[in-house]
Amino acid sequence: MQICLGSSCFSRGNREVVAFIRDYLKKNHLDDRIIFKGARCMNLCSNGPNLKINDRIIEGVTISRIEGILEKEFGDIK
Ligand code: FES
């Protein structure tokens, strides 16, 4: 899983989303199974903040949506 840390996504809220994801992975003991890292601009800035999971880009990742996205993606393996 990669999160865009380009300036547009970062200023639109990915800074808070990074903290939330780290916490979520740790809390659910997924941090040793899921690789989570930062990425450069994905060239989809106007639809950001963006997140990439298995080469699929998820757009509009706000702090209010992130928990639902993670539950949908990883809820069955935690
Ligand atoms: S800054 Fe995230 S897509 Fe450009």
Image (spheres, grey):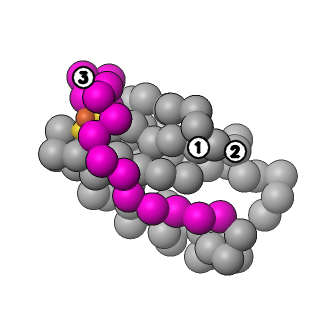
Quarter of the picture for ligand 1? top left
Distance of label 1 from label 2 (alpha carbons): 9 Å
Which one is in front, 10 or 41? Answer: 41
Q: Would residue 37 appear left or right of 1 to someone viewing this image?
A: left
- The amino acid type found where label 1 is placed reads Ile
Q: Are marks 1 and 2 in contact (CB under 8 Å)?
A: yes
Name, please, the residue furthest toward the right.
76
x and y percent of residue 58 in the render? 50, 32
Q: Report if the beta carbon of the residue with label 2 is closer than 8 angstroms to ligand 1.
A: no
Q: Which residue has dot 1 on it?
A: 53
Residue range in magenta is 34-48
x and y percent of residue 23 in the render? 50, 71
Secondary structure mainly formed by the magenta segment: loop
- Name the element at disc 1: strand
Classify 47 as above or below 63.
Answer: above
Q: Earlier in the sequence, mark 3 or mark 1?
A: 3
Residue 70 painted magenta:
no
Q: Which residue has dot 2 on it?
A: 73
Residue 40 painted magenta:
yes
Q: Would residue 41 appear left or right of 7 to someone viewing this image?
A: right
Q: Which residue occupies 51% across, 41% down?
A: 52
Classify 76 as above or below 19.
Answer: above
Q: Which mark is residue 46?
A: 3
Q: Residues within 10 Å of mark 1 (few under 14, many from 20)?
A: some
Q: Is residue 68 visible?
A: no
Asked which quadrant contains residue 44, the reply is top left
- The amino acid type found where label 2 is placed reads Glu
Q: Which residue occupies 47% across, 51% down?
A: 2
